[in-house]
Image: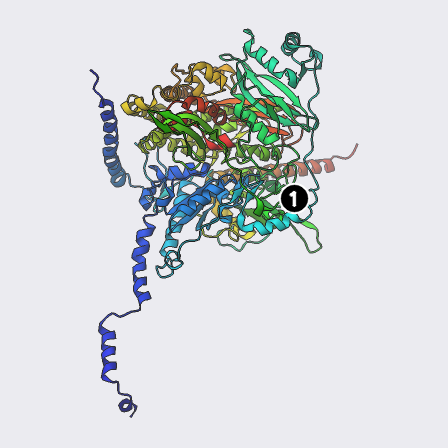
């Protein structure tokens, strides 16, 4: 005769086991491996821990992307000058944007000639799909994906169109959120500069040599 | 002196004393002392409506699960009835077809009620804003309390939005609360579905604009290409096999009925059915499986394309084409030969206006009956139409920001025929074959029509079923979809090839990596690019992790549907969170990975990826699958609810074009990773699990078994992944694709995901079609449900495992 309900009890046993584990594992985590603030769970920890947002939050991985930001060279809180802005208004980000949410007006000098700076730069955050193409394809490291996700508010018509002032962050801020990419960028720029210097030195040496050897 | 003159009377002294020693205040002040308690109580027991629209809803579910645990805010009681809910979280794209239901639900919520607009789509249409079926923001109809930007907002962002809402509640006063002061709440008028969405509050204005002469057409219209030329001989480009088959068909069916275009058979409409049944019935051909059916709008004709397969078998599908006249396109239906053509033919009718003669129920499927125009025709221009292809010139150099609404004729994403008067519009009655009254035991009984969805906790999104029942037995069932039709294909035909990647993420939003994969394959075929070795391994690892994620999700939510509310689902999506961590560290996003590129992947794996992935694959995931199976597999309730329910016999599964676990659970061993191997799957040793019963339980077993097989592949891939480049050639942002057509497909967790692309040599596809397994698997739903109880319908639907982003596209 088959007894009904044994498997049901087994299922309930599993639930019970997990209920008890929330205390045994949770106790250890709370009092032994205390890590409040920002963290990521490792695969070796049992179960899945509740992130006590807003007291603590998941540490965003470096590539985490929410909305794009523009970068200027400088420290946080510096007065941003057009000189320090990295954007050259080349327009690649606006062109590669899948929902076409980036709008750029190229800056002009006093004579009305276009200069490689942006006069206006707007992103419609209610159209943006956070895909990261703009940052991926920017040739000047001028637009990057920010980590800030705490953006909720009660109004969208004015506040959700980010303009050039709202979009800009400093390289110092960017270096903090994206340490690996920042180090890579610095290394790449250094290597480029060295290569350029070496090429310049070689060219100078060649020119000197050419000047020294009399024409035949 | 004055002191004596103005000495207070005794009364006044008394009053002063009372004021000094006894608390006396005004009524308003007294009430306002209650405000903090009142608001504290309300803000910590906000009950959201159990209501999800699109991708954002998945993040909303994760917010309710263990890792983020919305219960900490007293908001865990997701109520299935609007009458018990305080908060509506509009989580995802609001489509025109869905907005009447949303307004109705909101009207049914009692005051005080709040509304959170979650994600870019809900706030303003988001990336789908330009689509013809998308509402540019829920605030056009309902008052919004909190907006959460993001696409999709992460669970933490949703919690942040909830905190913002709680702060707003804390600022409210009993004395000025609108639900105490204003009498009965004003209902928002429910919009109507006419030639386009009709907001009845704007009737007069719309009538006036419609009376004006039609504005001039935009300067640049989409251009046509002509249908591919005929290639009757091998010398002109057809394959030898195709030439031989065409000759054989001409002999069998009648001379001149079949020619060749490329290697595809081009059949005359008159001989289509004869050719189709010949192909199906000849024992050596046995093309019994209609994989994909779609249509292309050329300058000179509509070309309907059929992709055929012989099951169980291997190899690439055979393409069959029929050309229909431009002015009155008609093609005979093939439903008699392949019943799986049902929904696909309806979709072609809906999008192109091609009439399939003999189809028993030819009406719109994604849009509503009465919608004006055939949206996928090249001459259909949406209200927000700007240019035939992206890049839009208005964005750069002189790109002053301007909302699409400001340029549109009706100031919104709307398009009415000229002379239209919304006040005179009468909505059409929905049709459903009337039941016949019967007499049982001397009592006259009647059939009852029940409506399940689109707002229902067990429909996995905004899916609707019209069910006719006799008592509790199902007599007929008609799926109604399109409530999340986000115009993926129309937008795709305007996007350049790269831009489509992030849109594919949003098809089956549980499996974005798999969607990327199929699309990359389809375009790589045309580009003739081969990804690097490391990239191939990364792709396989991501695709198999996705399969595990999706099957965990499917199993967990099948149990949800069966009534085991949320506990199994919670266990099932625990491991998912950690796999999403892997996706997030590699691609930058939990759900919308956008990780594949033509010839490679977007970025190399970060240093911590492989150790974490190995730990998960070798230790945690096997334990979790085992636990899940121990927990459920033999459970008596589960067995009773699932065994023998929703049986789809083997022949029917093939005939109805079922795919993926649904097909394999009916005893057909067909998995594209083996049958038409792509990427590097031929190097891995794995089995294709099948089951013979074809019921809900068999589908459950197949999914669990497939997870074990995925683990086999993952172990080998993670151990063997070579170092090296991740991108073949240079990564280009605006790639031109050689003219031609291709059909690329992958075995996604839900079944065969195919992309049919016609390129005209420019930077955006001329035709872009997605063969969505979630959509086509539903064709057999009625067959599976007939004769079962109403309660079984949700179980059967759960076992098919649909995702509405893909069903409706």
Q: Can residue B603 be seen in this view?
A: no
Residue sitting at 56 percent across and 50 percent down? B202
Q: Is residue B649 visible?
A: yes
Left or right: where A90 falls relative to B458: right
Residue closest to the far bottom = B1
Report x, y in % for residue B421. 60, 46
Callout count: 1
Image quadrant occupied by the N terminus of chain B: bottom left
Report x, y in % for residue B109. 39, 47
Report x, y in % for residue B613. 40, 27
Viewer-nearest residue: B568 or B642: B642
Residue sitting at 47 percent across and 32 percent down? B804
Report x, y in % for residue A17. 23, 30
Residue sitting at 27 percent across and 40 percent down? A30
Viewer-nearest residue: B1 or B93: B93
Q: In which quarter of the image is residue B795?
A: top left
**Chain identity of mark 1:** B
Q: In which quarter of the image is residue B229?
A: top right
Residue closest to the far front = B442
Viewer-nearest residue: B473 or B214: B473
Local SS, label 1: loop
The residue under label 1 is B418
């Amino acid at each position: 005769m088959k007894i009904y309900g044994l498997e049901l009890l087994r299922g309930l046993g599993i639930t019970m086991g997990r209920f008890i584990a929330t205390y045994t594992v949770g106790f250890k985590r709370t009092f032994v491996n205390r890590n409040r603030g920002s963290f990521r769970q490792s695969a070796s920890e049992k179960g899945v821990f509740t992130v006590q947002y807003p007291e603590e939050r998941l540490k965003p991985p470096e590539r985490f992307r929410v909305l794009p930001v523009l970068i200027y060279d400088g420290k946080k809180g510096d007065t941003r000058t057009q000189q320090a802005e990295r954007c050259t208004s080349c327009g690649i980000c606006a062109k590669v944007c899948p929902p076409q949410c980036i709008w750029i007006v190229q800056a002009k000098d006093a004579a009305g000639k276009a200069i490689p700076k942006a006069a206006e730069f707007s992103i419609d955050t209610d159209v943006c799909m956070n895909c990261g193409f703009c940052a991926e394809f920017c040739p000047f490291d001028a637009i990057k994906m920010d980590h800030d996700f705490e953006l909720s508010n009660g109004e969208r018509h004015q506040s959700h169109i980010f303009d050039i002032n709202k979009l800009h962050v400093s390289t110092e801020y960017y270096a903090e959120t994206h340490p690996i990419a920042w180090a890579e960028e610095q290394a790449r720029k250094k290597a480029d500069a060295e290569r350029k210097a070496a090429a310049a030195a070689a060219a100078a040496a060649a020119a000197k040599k050419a000047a020294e050897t009399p024409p035949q | 002196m004055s002191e004596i003159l103005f000495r207070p009377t005794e009364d006044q002294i008394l009053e002063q004393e009372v004021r000094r020693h006894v608390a006396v205040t005004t009524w308003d002040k007294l009430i306002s002392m209650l405000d903090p308690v009142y608001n504290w109580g309300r803000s910590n027991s906000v009950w959201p409506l159990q209501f999800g629209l699109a991708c954002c809803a998945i993040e909303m579910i994760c917010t309710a699960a263990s890792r983020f645990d919305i219960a900490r805010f007293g908001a865990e009681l997701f109520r299935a009835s609007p009458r018990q809910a305080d908060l509506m979280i509009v989580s995802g794209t609001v489509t025109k077809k869905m907005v009447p239901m949303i307004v109705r639900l909101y009207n049914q919520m009692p005051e005080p009620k709040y509304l959170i607009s979650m994600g870019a789509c809900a706030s303003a249409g988001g990336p789908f804003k330009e689509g013809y079926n998308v509402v540019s923001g829920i605030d056009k109809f309902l008052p919004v309390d909190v907006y959460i930007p993001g696409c999709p907002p992460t669970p933490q962002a949703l919690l942040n939005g909830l905190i913002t809402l709680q702060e707003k509640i804390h600022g409210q006063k009993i004395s000025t609360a609108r639900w105490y002061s204003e009498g009965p709440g004003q209902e928002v008028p429910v919009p109507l579905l006419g030639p386009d969405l009709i907001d009845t509050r704007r009737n007069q204005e719309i009538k006036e604009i419609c009376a004006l002469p039609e504005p001039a057409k935009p300067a640049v219209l989409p251009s046509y290409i002509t249908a591919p030329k005929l290639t009757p001989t091998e010398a002109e480009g057809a394959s030898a096999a195709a030439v031989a088959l065409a000759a054989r068909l001409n002999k069998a069916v009648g001379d001149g009925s079949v020619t060749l275009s490329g290697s595809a058979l081009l059949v005359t409409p008159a001989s289509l059915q004869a050719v189709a049944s010949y192909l199906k019935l000849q024992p050596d051909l046995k093309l019994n499986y209609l994989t994909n059916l779609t249509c292309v709008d050329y300058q000179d004709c509509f070309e309907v394309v059929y992709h055929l397969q012989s099951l169980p078998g291997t190899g690439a599908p055979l393409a069959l084409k029929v050309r229909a006249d431009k002015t009155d396109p008609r093609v005979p239906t093939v439903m008699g030969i392949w019943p799986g053509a049902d929904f696909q033919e309806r979709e072609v009718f809906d999008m192109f206006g091609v009439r399939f003669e003999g189809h028993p129920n030819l009406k719109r499927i994604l849009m509503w009956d009465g919608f004006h125009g055939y949206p996928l025709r090249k001459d259909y221009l949406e209200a927000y139409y700007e240019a035939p292809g992206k890049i839009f010139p208005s964005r750069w150099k002189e790109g002053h920001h301007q909302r699409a609404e400001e340029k549109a004729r009706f100031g919104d994403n709307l398009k009415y025929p000229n002379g239209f008067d919304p006040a005179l519009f009468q909505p059409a009655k929905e049709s459903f074959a009337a039941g016949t009254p019967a007499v049982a035991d001397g009592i006259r009984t009647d059939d009852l029509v029940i409506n399940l969805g689109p707002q229902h906790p067990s429909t996995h999104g905004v899916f609707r079923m019209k069910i006719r029942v006799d008592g509790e037995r199902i007599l007929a069932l008609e799926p109604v979809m399109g409530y999340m039709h986000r115009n993926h294909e129309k937008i795709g035909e305007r996007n350049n090839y790269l831009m489509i990647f992030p849109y594919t993420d949003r098809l089956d939003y549980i499996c974005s990596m798999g969607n990327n994969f199929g699309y990359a394959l389809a375009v790589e075929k045309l580009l003739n690019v081969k990804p690097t070795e490391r990239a191939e391994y990364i792709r396989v690892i991501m695709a198999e992790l996705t399969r595990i994620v999706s099957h965990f999700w499917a199993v967990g939510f099948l149990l949800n549907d069966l009534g085991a509310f949320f506990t199994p689902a919670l266990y099932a999506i625990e491991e998912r969170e950690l796999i999403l961590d892997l996706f997030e560290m590699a691609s930058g996003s939990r759900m919308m990975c956008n990780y594949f590129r033509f010839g490679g992947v977007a970025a190399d794996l970060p240093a911590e990826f492989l150790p974490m992935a190995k730990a998960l694959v070798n230790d945690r995931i096997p334990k979790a699958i085992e636990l899940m199976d121990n927990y459920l597999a033999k459970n008596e309730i589960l067995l009773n609810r699932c065994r023998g329910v929703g049986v789809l016999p083997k022949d029917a599964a093939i005939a109805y074009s079922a795919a993926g676990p649904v097909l394999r659970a009916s005893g057909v061993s067909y998995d594209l990773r083996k049958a038409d191997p792509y990427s590097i799957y031929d190097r891995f040793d794995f089995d294709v699990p099948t089951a013979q019963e074809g019921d809900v339980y068999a589908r459950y077993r197949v999914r669990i078994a497939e997870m074990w097989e995925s683990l086999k592949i993952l172990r080998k891939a993670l151990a063997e992944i070579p170092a090296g480049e991740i991108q073949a050639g240079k990564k280009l942002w605006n790639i031109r694709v050689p003219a031609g057509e291709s059909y690329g497909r992958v075995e996604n967790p839900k079944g065969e995901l195919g992309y049919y692309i016609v390129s005209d040599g420019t930077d955006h596809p001329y035709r872009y079609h997605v063969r969505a397994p979630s959509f086509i698997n539903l064709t057999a739903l009625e067959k599976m449900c007939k004769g079962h109880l109403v309660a079984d319908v949700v179980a059967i639907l759960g076992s098919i495992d649909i995702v509405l982003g893909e069903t409706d596209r």
